[in-house]
Image (cartoon, rainbow, N blue to C red):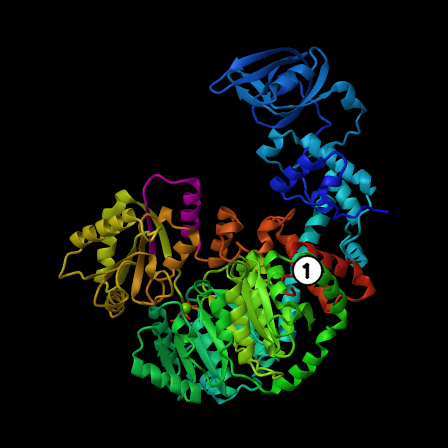
């Protein structure tokens, strides 16, 4: 009988309440399972013993056999330290303790052979080893010794409280003794044999007590694969569920708008990448599922025309399309661009932004609702409730990271209600008690688990809802189709959800939006409250619920909105590796090719004392009719220093480039939007030759005649920002330049950034370097996703294992979508338990 791995860690022999508390607080270890998954950071060769005269000044962990010959106490700033002289036949060194000195002096034996293990330091002419692991040589020889000694993650507090690495190893040994090394297999036989993986049992044994190097690396491989496999499985499942559950309008035909444009008005031949991406989009639009696609392409790669042609497909099928951009300037640019592209097609396009006049706005609202207006472009203004489409079929979002998930899901709701789903909804609703057979067992288990772990706010609300206290009958933790709803009223088809703190994460918000959408489709309304709302003002919450329910007629199914297809465009490339983990549930298209004939931007790095040459270069370019950007860092919107730099720079440039010969624009974040717009327009129209700006111009501005980008204090910018800024030039036919100005003081990371910029124009390559420099934590979108909490795999270094894990996760689901075959029993069970205990199955409950 193997032990239950969910047993609290307190029960393990040798742990006890104090240590258990520390393990929980310091390492998040609550159960046997958690302990088992605490993988060593590294291993040390313990077959080797060093002599004192062999020690090197490399701070490595070593073990030495020797004797303590004397103790002395040395006073220091605060308290004192205990120093022991440690000696072997080649020399002496010191062992040092800053704490626990009394116990050590009383318990350690003088002139008796010990094995000392730890890191050595070189300090005032001698080696010393602070807080060594000491073991009597006699005991050491009796103990079972493994060649590779695991070193576990630790914290200062743990080692201060005596949970040394040796103690950790002992505890781990005890875990293996109690469980007799019996661990359930978590992968299928097929995968094990196809990939020649060692069993779970063998992998766990060898990760903690490696028999030899080969078994250690096989254990590492197997566990990394498993970890990445389940993440990919989850992401792919989410994608599949999305596809099967969220209906989209099938855009079956490609008709005159598209064909006329393609055959007659296409202004240039599409690149192969553009053609490929369009094909991918067309396939999505033609299927029955809602498209949810991310389109990545470097600045200037030609995403706009792809967006436009996708819109034409929507129009061909009688639907409207919209394009949302993060700023007014960008919206205007898109508007002008699309007007130009569509000029011979007789399409009605309008733009709606914050500054659209009320009278115009009214007309747009009207034309949108009666369907005369086919394409609407704009800013956040598109999201306002007043903006109602007759039949929005495709929503395109430019520069994705500027918009939140909440905004994206708001767009979803702009789709028209669809009566054809009502019949289906009724029948699904009838079956609410019987979720799909394949998932029912799973849901039942989750349900029990949920009830056991209900939160305070859930209990509070339940007290007020049960027994028809509000006059409505509610059920708790109720299974509906594939979900467990917190509270349900089946007369009015209303679901009440309480969101815990983790609902703030991006992933969870997306999962929530998806779930709400599916529930809407099958006829349920969903209201959500946060923990704080319930605990803070339960009366208000109850009032809201009562009013809401009373306002609804009984037994009627609300009309679901079919969401438009969604295409998100971004010019910030995310390294493929990361995209796979962060956006693994979205479909991704990549334009990895620039239009032909584009001259690549020449990038150089210049020091501040070369400024005169740089100014001469600017003068030459202006005399050729070109325009120049000069950008200053504005790292913090409020930093007075940064503004001073900007204004000083502006003044000195004004002196070197005097009016009336030269005209200069300036744009920064403290200006009023109208003033900014005015200055931008002067530059766009070519009335000014130089644009002095902060990073407000970073996104998307298109002035083809601007051919020089000068970035001041370039060492202060991140790589992706530098790349974005550089992308403002190189848009016309002329050779363009990017000049990175810095002082001589550069950190090694800054140097790498500058060198990378000078070396390459490839956004994906730059993104990879950025990922290596900053780690995944700082890259957009990763903060809340699981990739940072990996236990053993490394998102950067284990890229090939990741690829393979994704491949096999896809294959497994392809052959057995519900994972219900006998073969995949282990996988399904593991997946369920991961969902139960780690909340990764956030989409379901
Ligand atoms: P981005 O991907 O940055 O949005 P745009 O769509 O603005 O890029 O395209 C940049 C420029 O390249 C535009 O002037 C556009 O007309 C042009 N362009 C796009 N595709 C092609 C192509 N296949 N051949 C030639 N020029 C193209
Ligand atoms: Mg663009």
Depicted 109 relative to depicted 620: above or below: above
Any part of residue 467 in sight: yes
Any part of residue 816 in sight: no
Query: Residue 542, position in %: x, y?
Result: 54, 68
Quadrant of residue 626 within the rendered picture: bottom left
Residue found 52% across the figure and 48% down from its top: 775
Depicted 282 relative to depicted 60: above or below: below
Figure quadrant of the C terminus: bottom right
Q: Which of the pair 610/542 is nearer the observer?
A: 542
- Residue 116, magenta (yes or no): no
Which region shows up in magenta? 738-760
Q: Which of the pair 799/627 is nearer the observer?
A: 799
- Residue 745, magenta (yes or no): yes
> Which residue was labeled with disc 1?
450
Question: In which quadrant of this rendering is ligand 2 seen?
Answer: bottom left
Query: Residue 615, position in %: x, y?
Result: 23, 52
Query: Residue 16, position in %: x, y?
Result: 72, 36
Query: Residue 690, position in %: x, y?
Result: 24, 60
Q: Which of the pair 615/836 is nearer the observer?
A: 836
Residue found 33% across the figure and 60% down from its top: 696
Question: Mark 1 near ligand 2 (CB under 8 Å)?
Answer: no
**SS class of the residue under badge 1?**
helix
């Amino acid at each position: 009988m193997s032990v239950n791995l969910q047993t609290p860690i307190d029960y393990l022999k040798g742990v006890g309440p104090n240590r258990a508390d520390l393990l929980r607080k310091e390492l998040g270890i609550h159960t046997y399972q958690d302990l088992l998954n605490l993988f060593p950071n590294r291993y040390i060769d313990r077959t080797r013993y060093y002599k004192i005269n062999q020690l090197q000044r490399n701070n490595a962990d070593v073990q030495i056999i020797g004797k303590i010959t004397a103790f002395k106490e040395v006073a220091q700033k605060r308290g004192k330290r205990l120093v022991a002289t440690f000696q072997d036949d080649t020399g002496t060194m010191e062992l040092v303790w800053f704490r626990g000195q009394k116990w050590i002096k009383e318990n350690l034996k003088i002139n008796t052979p010990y094995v000392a293990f730890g890191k050595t330091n070189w300090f005032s002419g001698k080696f010393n080893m602070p807080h060594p692991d000491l073991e009597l040589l006699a005991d050491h020889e009796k103990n079972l010794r493994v060649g590779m000694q695991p070193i576990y993650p630790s914290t200062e507090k743990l080692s201060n409280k005596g949970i040394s690495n040796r103690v950790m190893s002992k505890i781990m040994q005890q875990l293996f003794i109690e469980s007799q090394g019996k661990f359930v297999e978590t992968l299928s036989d097929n995968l094990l044999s196809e990939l020649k993986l060692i069993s779970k049992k063998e992998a766990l044994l060898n990760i903690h007590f490696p028999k030899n190097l080969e078994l250690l690396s096989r254990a590492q491989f197997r566990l990394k694969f498993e970890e990445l496999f389940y993440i990919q499985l989850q992401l792919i499942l989410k994608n599949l569920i999305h596809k099967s559950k969220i209906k989209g309008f099938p855009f079956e035909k490609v008709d005159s708008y598209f064909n006329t444009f393609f055959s007659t008005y296409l202004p240039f031949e599409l690149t192969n990448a553009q053609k490929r991406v369009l094909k991918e989009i067309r396939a999505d639009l033609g299927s029955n599922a809602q498209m949810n696609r991310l389109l990545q392409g470097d600045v200037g790669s030609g995403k706009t025309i792809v967006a436009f042609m996708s819109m034409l497909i929507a129009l061909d099928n009688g639907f409207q399309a919209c394009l949302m951009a993060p700023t007014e300037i960008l919206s205007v640019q898109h508007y002008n661009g699309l007007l130009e592209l569509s000029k011979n097609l007789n399409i009605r396009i309008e733009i709606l932004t914050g500054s659209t006049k009320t009278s115009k706005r009214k007309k747009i609202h009207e034309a949108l609702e009666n369907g005369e207006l086919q394409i609407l472009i704009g800013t956040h203004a598109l999201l306002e409730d007043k903006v109602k489409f007759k039949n929005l079929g495709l929503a395109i979002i430019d520069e994705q990271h500027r918009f939140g998930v909440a905004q994206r899901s708001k767009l979803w709701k702009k789709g028209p209600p669809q009566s054809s789903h009502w019949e289906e909804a009724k029948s699904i609703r009838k079956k609410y008690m019987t979720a799909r057979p394949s998932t029912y067992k799973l849901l039942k288990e989750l349900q029990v688990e949920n009830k056991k772990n209900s939160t305070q706010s859930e209990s509070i609300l339940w007290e007020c809802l049960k027994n028809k206290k509000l006059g409505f009958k509610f059920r708790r933790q109720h299974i509906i189709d594939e979900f467990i709803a917190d509270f349900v009223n089946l007369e009015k088809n209303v679901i009440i959800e309480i969101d815990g703190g983790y609902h703030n994460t991006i992933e969870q918000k997306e999962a929530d939006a998806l779930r709400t959408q599916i529930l809407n489709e099958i006829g349920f309304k969903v209201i959500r409250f946060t923990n704080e709302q319930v605990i803070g003002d339960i009366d208000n919450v109850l009032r809201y619920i009562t009013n809401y329910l009373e306002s609804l007629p009984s037994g009627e199914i609300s009309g679901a909105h079919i969401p438009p297809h969604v295409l998100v465009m971004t010019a910030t490339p995310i390294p493929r590796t990361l995209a796979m983990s962060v956006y693994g549930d979205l479909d991704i298209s990549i334009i990895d090719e620039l239009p032909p004939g584009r001259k690549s931007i020449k990038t150089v790095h210049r020091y501040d004392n070369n400024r005169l040459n740089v100014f001469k270069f600017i003068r030459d370019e202006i005399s050729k009719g070109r325009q120049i950007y000069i950008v200053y860092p504005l790292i913090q919107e409020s930093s007075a220093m940064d503004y001073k730099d900007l204004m000083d720079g502006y003044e000195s440039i004004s002196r070197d480039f005097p009016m009336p010969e030269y005209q200069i624009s300036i744009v920064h974040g403290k200006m009023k939007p109208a003033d900014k717009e005015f200055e931008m327009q002067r530059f766009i129209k070519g009335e000014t030759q130089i644009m002095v700006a902060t990073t407000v111009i970073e996104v998307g501005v298109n002035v083809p005649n601007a051919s020089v980008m000068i970035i001041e204090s370039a060492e202060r910018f991140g790589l992706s920002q530098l790349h974005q800024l550089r992308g403002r030039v190189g848009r016309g036919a002329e050779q363009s330049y990017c000049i990175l100005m810095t002082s001589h003081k550069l950190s090694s990371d800054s140097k790498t950034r500058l060198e990378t910029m000078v070396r390459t124009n490839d956004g994906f390559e730059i993104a990879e370097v950025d990922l290596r420099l900053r780690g995944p934590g700082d890259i957009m979108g990763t903060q809340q996703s699981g990739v940072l909490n990996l236990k053993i795999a490394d998102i950067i270094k284990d890229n090939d294992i990741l690829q393979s894990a994704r491949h096999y996760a896809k294959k497994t689901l392809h052959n057995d979508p519900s994972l219900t075959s006998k073969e995949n029993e282990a996988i399904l069970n593991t997946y369920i338990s991961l969902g139960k205990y780690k909340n990764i199955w956030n989409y379901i409950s």
